[in-house]
């Protein structure tokens, strides 16, 4: 067995306290691997190889990196007589794990024409087969089992990235090609906007240790919330169009200083993918160009845009503990990857007066909370400790998942995070305000 100290200490922060049966873990692993490949199946080899910007990786790279993760952190450490599929892959498909060694520059992932897609798919098949063969041995080791769960959840993150990165790529193509054929857009009547009251007080926030969690979701800790109100549903395309029509992008009083500089430097006039068509707005989706539906949640807005809209609306963005408090008692239902809409959908059924709608799925919701460690947070030792902790600087937290998030991947305590100018993700917003 190869000794690899890089993954030591992982069980303290990446765990599943209620470890499922051996068969269930194997089924989850195979389902995750198959889902990733199904997402890539409609694409050409050229589609899979291109990189449209530094933050967006080629689909081929995602296919390889998720295999690299299992090979590097499981097969290399826990199997006897380990031999890498290709020694060059250790550098080519390392993302940001400095503890593992050298890595190919992120901005140049689209230049990796070799290995070709067929070779990467062979790599995936090799790693999947070797993991299944080693699974009885892996499940006898608590650290290896925890890493298996982490690898599955890690690959689910990359399933979402495959689609968000691909959308950005296809939008750059002058033909505006669709990933899937267009779906019939059904007009849904507008739902009445409501404010839902929360009394606040001393609450507990963060993951409680039951089931899988990423390290940044804990430790569970106490937070005091002032009384607040949360909007009944996310801000819609139609509501955001009203902000634009009222000169929202031309009013410096609505913007953070850094946000205003960003708007001016980049000539931002609307959310990403919006295009004017006469007096109307159209937007690019994974199913091609469509007219904006005024009743669907707005997406692809940055933190700067979300914050400016909230000011314009006489409100603010929720704090992440407020969002989690409201979501913790709600079912994890919504429009997710498995629903195959690949776009946020309008609210179809009115909810009870005191229940917020669409907290899960459709769009990630920006919060006003900086992405920082919770009290008592400690990153795991070794390379896996680089998973989240080292990014706790100059970023903001988003909650709830999106229309391309796998349903089983999300939970109330899940903390996504991006810098304030990022908007190629399905990021939207929900308003909050302090009680008078």
Image (spheres, helix red, strand yellow):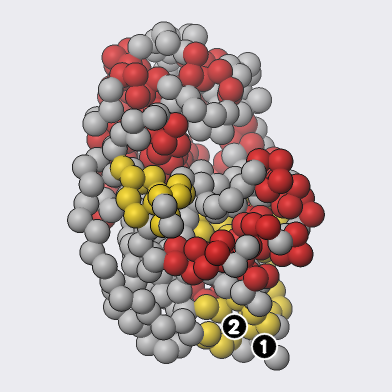
Which residue corresponds to the image point at 71% horizontal and 78% vertical from the top-left?
A: 224
**Is the C-beta separation of discs 2 and 1 under 8 Å?**
yes
Choose between 335 and 30: the one closer to the eye. 335
Q: Position of residue 400 (x, y in %)?
A: 47, 61
- Image quadrant where residue 127 sits: top left
User: Extreme front residue here?
Assistant: 278
Which residue corresponds to the image point at 68% horizontal and 82% vertical from the top-left?
A: 434
Locate residue 363 relative to residue 316 in the image: left or right. left
Which residue is the site of mark 2?
229
The reply to whether residue 382 is visible in this rendering is yes
Using the image, tell me which numbered label, if any, was put on residue 435. Answer: 1
Helix, strand or loop under label 2: strand
- Image quadrant where residue 237 sits: bottom left
Mark 2 and mark 1: Cα distance apart in space: 6 Å
Using the image, tell me which numbered label, if any, was put on residue 6. Answer: none
Query: From the image, which quarter does the C terminus lie in?
Result: bottom right
Image: 68 above or below 396: above
Choose between 217 and 427: the one closer to the eye. 427
- Image quadrant where residue 189 sits: bottom left
């Amino acid at each position: 067995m190869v000794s690899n100290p890089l993954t030591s200490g992982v069980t303290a922060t990446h765990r599943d306290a209620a470890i499922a049966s051996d068969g269930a873990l194997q089924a989850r692993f195979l389902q995750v691997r198959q889902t990733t490949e199904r997402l890539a199946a409609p694409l050409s080899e050229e589609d899979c190889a291109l990189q449209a910007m530094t933050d967006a990786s080629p689909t081929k790279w995602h296919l390889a990196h998720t295999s690299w993760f299992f090979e590097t952190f499981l097969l290399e450490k826990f199997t006897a007589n380990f031999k890498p599929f290709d020694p060059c892959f250790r550098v080519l498909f390392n993302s940001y794990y400095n503890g593992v060694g050298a890595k190919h520059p992120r901005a140049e992932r689209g230049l990796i024409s070799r290995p070709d897609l067929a070779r990467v798919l062979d790599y995936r098949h090799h790693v999947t087969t070797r993991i299944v063969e080693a699974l009885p041995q892996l499940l006898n080791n608590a650290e290896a089992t925890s890493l298996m769960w982490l690898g599955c959840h890690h690959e689910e993150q990359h399933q979402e990235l495959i689609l968000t990165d691909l959308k950005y790529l296809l939008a750059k193509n002058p033909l505006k090609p669709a990933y899937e054929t267009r779906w019939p857009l059904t007009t849904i009547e507008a739902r009445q906007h409501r404010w839902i009251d929360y009394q606040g007080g001393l609450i507990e926030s963060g993951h409680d240790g039951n089931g899988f969690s990423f390290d940044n979701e804990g430790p569970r800790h106490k937070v005091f919330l002032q009384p607040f109100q949360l909007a009944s549903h996310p801000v819609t395309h139609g509501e955001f169009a009203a902000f634009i029509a009222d000169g929202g992008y031309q009013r410096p009083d609505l913007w953070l200083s850094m946000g205003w500089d960003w708007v001016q430097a980049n000539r931002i006039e609307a959310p990403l993918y919006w295009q004017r068509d006469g007096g109307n707005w159209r937007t690019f989706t994974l199913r091609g160009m469509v007219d904006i539906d005024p009743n669907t949640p707005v997406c692809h807005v940055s933190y700067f845009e979300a914050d400016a809209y909230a000011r314009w609306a006489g409100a603010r963005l929720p704090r992440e503990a407020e969002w989690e408090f409201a979501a913790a008692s709600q079912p994890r239902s919504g429009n997710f990857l498995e629903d195959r809409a690949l776009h946020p959908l309008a609210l179809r059924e009115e909810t009870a007066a005191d229940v917020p709608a669409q907290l899960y799925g459709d769009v990630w919701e920006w919060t006003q909370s900086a992405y920082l460690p919770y009290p008592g947070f400690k990153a795991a030792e070794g390379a896996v400790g680089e998973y989240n902790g080292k990014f706790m600087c100059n970023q903001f937290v988003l909650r709830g998942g999106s229309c391309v998030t796998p349903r089983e991947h999300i939970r109330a305590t899940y903390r996504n995070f991006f810098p304030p100018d990022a908007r190629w993700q399905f990021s939207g917003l929900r308003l909050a305000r302090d009680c008078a």
